[in-house]
Amino acid sequence: MNLLEIWDRFKKNGFARVHNIPTNDAIESFYIALLAFNSNRIDVALAFSQKALSQEPCNILYTQATSYLKKVLKNGKKNVYISPTGFAEFIRGGGNVPLYQAVAKMLRNIYQQYSNLSVLDIGVGDGLALLPALTKNIRHVDVVEPSKALLDNVRKEFSRLNISHEAFESTLQEFVKSSPKRSWDLIQSTFCLQSIPPNERGDLFKWLAETGSRLIIIEFDVPEFPEQCSPDQVKYVTERYNQGLTEYLENRELVAKEFLMPVMFGYFDQDCARTNFEHSVQEWILQLRNSGYQTIECFEVYPYWWAPAVMIDAKL
Ligand SMILES: C[S@@+](CC[C@H](N)C(=O)[O-])C[C@H]1O[C@@H](n2cnc3c(N)ncnc32)[C@H](O)[C@@H]1O
C-alpha cells in the first residue's frame, strides 16, 4: 500500500482503519506513526516508529523519532522554549551558523540606513540574531520574549554592553494588551511570528502598524500544505528533517530530543502543543497588506535546509 492509499483510508475512516494496515517499507510505517501521533495515540505512534526503524535501522530520523516518542509517552509534550538547552545548541550548530551570520548582516544593513533609531524585537530568543547585529546608532532597544531562560541571556548581554533597553517577559499578545502606547522606528521579528496562530495575527499586525512604520520579518518560505498529514507534507518534512539531523554530530541526541523532534511532530499535532504555523512568503505578504502595510519587499537571506530564509521589509 502506498502513502496515498493510506491517506485515503485515513480520511474516509479515521485512524481506526489505518493502524492494522500491513506496511512493507519504512516510510509507510513511519507515515502511520505520524497519523497515530495526529490522532493522539502516542503508544501506537511509538510502535510504528519502532517498526520503521527496524525496516531501516540506519535511518537517523526514525532513530530520533523513536527515542522522542518514548519520552512523550512517559512525560507528555512540553514547550520547546521552556528549557533552552536544545534550542540554544540547535541554533549554534549546522546550517544555523551561516544562516544567523546572514541574518545579522542583513539586520545591520537595515540599521545603518538610519542616523539613529529605536528597535523593538519580538520573540528575541536568546539574542542570537539581534545581539551580533547591533550598531552604535541604536539609541534604545525593547525586547519581548516569553521564555525567561532565553530572555535572561539577552538582559545580561544588554547590561554588559551598556545598551539602553527594556526586556519584557511576555508573549506579543500579552505585551499588546498590557503595554502603554509607545512607538519604535523599527519593529523586527526573526523566526518568531510563525509561532503565533494565523487567526490571531490580524489584530497584532494592526497594532504593530500603529506603533512602528516599518516591520522587518525574517521567516522560512515554506510550501503550503492545505491538509495536515497529507503525503506531500509528510514527504517534504521527513526528507528535510533527515537532512537537518545529519548536520548535528556530537550533540544530535540533545538537539533532536529537545528541539527538532518536538517541532517536527508539532506539524502533525492537532492540539495546542503545536509551536509552529509556517507558510509561504506570499501568505505573509497578504497578511501584512491586509493590516495596512503598503510597500512590501522580499530578499532571500540564506538557502537553509528546511526552506529558504527570507527577509520581508514592510512599510506603511
Ligand atoms: C525560533 S525562536 C527565534 C528566536 C530569535 N528571534 C532568533 O532569531 O534566534 C522563536 C522565539 O519566539 C518566542 N515566542 C513564541 N511565541 C511567542 C509569542 N506569542 N510572542 C512572542 N514571542 C514568542 C519563543 O519563545 C522563541 O524564543
Image (cartoon, rainbow, N blue to C red):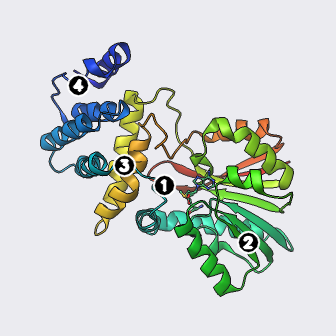
For badge 2, the amino acid type reads Glu
Q: Are marks 3 and 1 in contact (CB under 8 Å)?
A: no
Distance CA(mark 3)–CA(mark 2): 36 Å
> Quick one: label 2 or label 1, which is nearer the N terminus?
2
Report the residue that reaches farthest toward the top. Answer: 12
Q: Residues within 10 Å of mark 1 (few under 14, many from 20)?
A: some
Of the residues tagged 1 and 4, which is closer to the observer?
Answer: 4
Residue assigned mark 4: 19
Q: Are marks 3 and 2 in contact (CB under 8 Å)?
A: no
> Quick one: label 1 or label 4, which is nearer the N terminus?
4
Of the residues tagged 4 and 2, which is closer to the observer?
Answer: 2
Image coordinates for residue 75, horizontal then vertical, percent = 31, 51
Distance CA(mark 3)–CA(mark 1): 12 Å
> Quick one: label 4 or label 2, which is nearer the N terminus?
4
For badge 3, the amino acid type reads Tyr
Distance CA(mark 3)–CA(mark 4): 24 Å
Q: Are marks 3 and 4 in contact (CB under 8 Å)?
A: no
> Quick one: label 3 or label 4, which is nearer the N terminus?
4
Of the residues tagged 3 and 4, which is closer to the observer?
Answer: 4
Quick check: 268 above or below 262?
A: above
Residue assigned mark 3: 241
Q: Quadrant of ligand 1?
A: bottom right
Residue assigned mark 1: 304
Residue assigned mark 2: 166
